[in-house]
Amino acid sequence: MAIKTSVALSPEQGLSRYLTEIRKFPMLEKEQEFMLAKRWQEHEDTEAAEQMVTSHLRLVAKIAMGYRGYGLPMAEVISEGNVGLMQAVKKFDPDKGFRLATYAMWWIRAAIQEYILRSWSLVKLGTTAAQKKLFFNLRRIKGEINALDTGDLNPEQVKHIAEQLNVPEKDVRSMNGRMSGSDASLNAPMGTEGDMEWQDWLADDEPGQAETFANRQEFDSRMELLQEAMADLSEREQHILQERRLTDEPKTLEELSEVYNVSRERIRQIEVRAFEKIQKAMKRMAKEQGLPVSS
């Protein structure tokens, strides 16, 4: 059964009004969230699902605002994030022991990034994990070094970004050129007599429906593996991993050391151990389910 919600972005409503309206939905206490999730899981109670969705709409908006620099309508970015949220609610298992927000942010980001990669440019920007990482972090790092408005990057800036993202310098220059340039019109005339258009020379290298479906299935499976693996962590490990690696604004070791009254090195050790547990558990479960296992 699909999850639907009565709250939706629309041109008539406007973004400002929407952002005001979603603040009216109360945040859920842990016990309340658990009971609502069980009602959806066991009885497909759509009212319970909608309450979980609406209580997390402000999380979607917060994550979506981090993607304002890509020139896309923010209302559409938020709408795509809401789709990811609904998918997360649909698959959320409250018995795993952690909150919906921890699980949902993966789905929200994935939905938004997929939309941006699909819509931002008519030129395919690359599909490897490293290229996507470069695409979604280049603007942020350029902002940190005050290079957003400079167009071409100088050698020192290219080297700095390449080291930060662990990618080749040539990839940084190439991606920066693509993101700095404007898209050419697909209807631009070509040929000696202008009787052809640029789009006539473009090959369709997008994945077919079968490949897209297979990729989506694998993504869904890995999200479920992540949820299973997170459940094996202690509450402290979950929280530290969440705050260090699964948020838009990671907390520092110093900040978390004050929360738990331990040293920064101890926080780092817990983070590394928790991440290693997640990796091992996901690899083991992926192998059991016949999914590709990264080295």
Image (tube, rainbow, N blue to C red):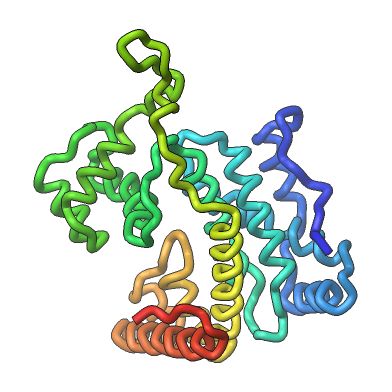
Q: In this view, does 164 lie above or below 288?
A: above
Q: Residue at x 51, y 84 (%)?
A: 286
Query: Is residue 246 rendered to the left or right of residue 12?
Result: left
| Residue 35 % position (x, y) | 82, 77
Q: In which quarter of the image is the N terminus?
A: bottom right
User: How many labels sit on residues?
Assistant: 0
Q: Residue at x 69, y 62 (%)?
A: 87
Q: Where is residue 25 in the image (x, y as percent from the top left)?
A: 76, 54
Residue 107 in picture, x, y percent from top left: 59, 62
- Quadrant where the C terminus sits is bottom left
Is residue 14 visible in the rendered image? The answer is yes
Corner quadrant of residue 148: top left
- Farthest residue toward the top? 193
Can you see residue 69? Answer: no
Q: Position of residue 121 (x, y in %)?
A: 43, 36
Q: Which residue is drawn at 39% across and 38% down?
A: 123
User: Front-most of 95 and 287?
Assistant: 287
Q: Nearer the viewer, residue 118 or 252?
A: 118
Name the foreground residue: 173 vs 138.
173
Side of 227 where 120 appears, left or right: left
Residue 244 against residue 208 in the figure, above or below = below
On the image, which quarter does residue 222 sit in?
Answer: bottom right
Tell me the residue at 53%/57% (across/down): 109
Left of 53 or right of it: where is 135? Answer: left
